[in-house]
Image (tube, rainbow, N blue to C red):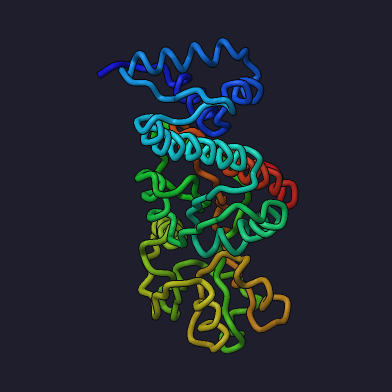
Amino acid sequence: MVDINLEYYKIFYYVGKARSITMAAEELSVSQPAVSQAIRHLEDSLGSPLFVRNPRGVRFTPEGEMLYSFVQRGYEYIRQGERKFREMLNLETGEIRIGASDMTLQFYLLEVLEQFHEKYPGIKVAVTNAPTPETLKHLQDGKIDFGVVSTPLNSRRGWNVKKVRRIEDVFVAGKKFSRLQQRVLAYRELENLPVLCLEKNTSTRNYVDGFLEKNHVVLSPEFELATSNMLIQFARKGMGIASVVKDFAEEFLRTGELFLLEFDEKIPSREFCVVTDERISVPPAVGKLLEMTEALPEKYGSF
């Protein structure tokens, strides 16, 4: 098989499109002899004439017309690809794949996604909603461009982990447990109370359990639920004391439907983190969204 300079096919496309060597030369901003020479090289390489000259310019030979039907589709497909490429660079189109938990989505990512969509409406954003361990597995498998997760997390080599916001784990209860209000409790007292927790496959549950175990406390939850929002609803109904990140309870703490339990020691704060894989190049749209997420910590306090 002969290795033919692809530039010859480009010139062939323009000559065929214009049916004129002169017009093709003008469109390509090259000399007419250069166009004629390129066509001769292509004909020599293929072993057959492609054009026949006529008073108006050129017309295809049967072989040339058949070849042009393929070259036209291929070249115009490449041009379409170039247009799409430029649109992606200009943030006019593209797709971003994000992994986030309910908590990081609701209390961190949603705000920046709203701003991003308003500014770049042509960018499609796909959010895979899953707990931190599952989100990190998606990043490892290349299914998402980045994850927004909560600590604790097991980082891998090549990952870039950026802390973006502090969060606080608390226990809240409704009026049914008002006897516990204004008291400073020991965590061991929770062993004799109906406690509501997230399921065990979440970073929140793992973190709180780990802290309590260091204090020689092991919980036997009354209910284990899939979402913190459901924990809050159960606590409002008086069904137990909910272990949640404080943000979920803020509205009901303000109204007085729930109150914070006070303990002799606070659970150390932890963080939301944006996790990327340094080994994978970041598309322009993803890079812009990451820039916007990094601007949010000013609202929440720097590290």
Tell me if residue 75 comes above or below residue 248 in the rendering: above
Q: Is residue 181 above or below residue 34?
A: below
The reply to whether residue 214 is visible in this rendering is no
Q: Is residue 54 visible?
A: yes
Q: Quadrant of residue 74?
A: top left
Q: Quadrant of the C terminus?
A: top right
* Picture coordinates of residue 41, whole percent (x, y): 41, 12
> In which quarter of the view is residue 17 placed?
top right
Nearest the eye: 85 or 114: 85
For the residue pair 43 and 296, the one nearer the viewer reads as: 43
Residue 210 versus residue 11 in the image, above or below: below
Name the residue at the front extreme: 55
Residue depicted at 62% across the width and 74% down the height: 183
> Which sits in the foreground, 40 or 29?
40
* Residue 210 image-quadrant placement: bottom left
Q: Could you tell me which residue is drawn at 46 percent across and 62 percent down?
A: 129
| Tag count | 0
Q: Position of residue 72 (x, y in %)?
A: 46, 37
At x 39% / y 54%, what residue is drawn?
133
Q: Quadrant of the N terminus?
A: top left
How far across and how far down the image is residue 198, in percent? Answer: 43, 69
Query: Closer to the camera, 103 or 141?
Result: 141
Going 38% across and 50% down the picture, which residue do you hit?
Answer: 138
Q: Position of residue 18 (x, y in %)?
A: 58, 32
From the viewer's perspective, tell me whether residue 289 is left or right of residue 133: right
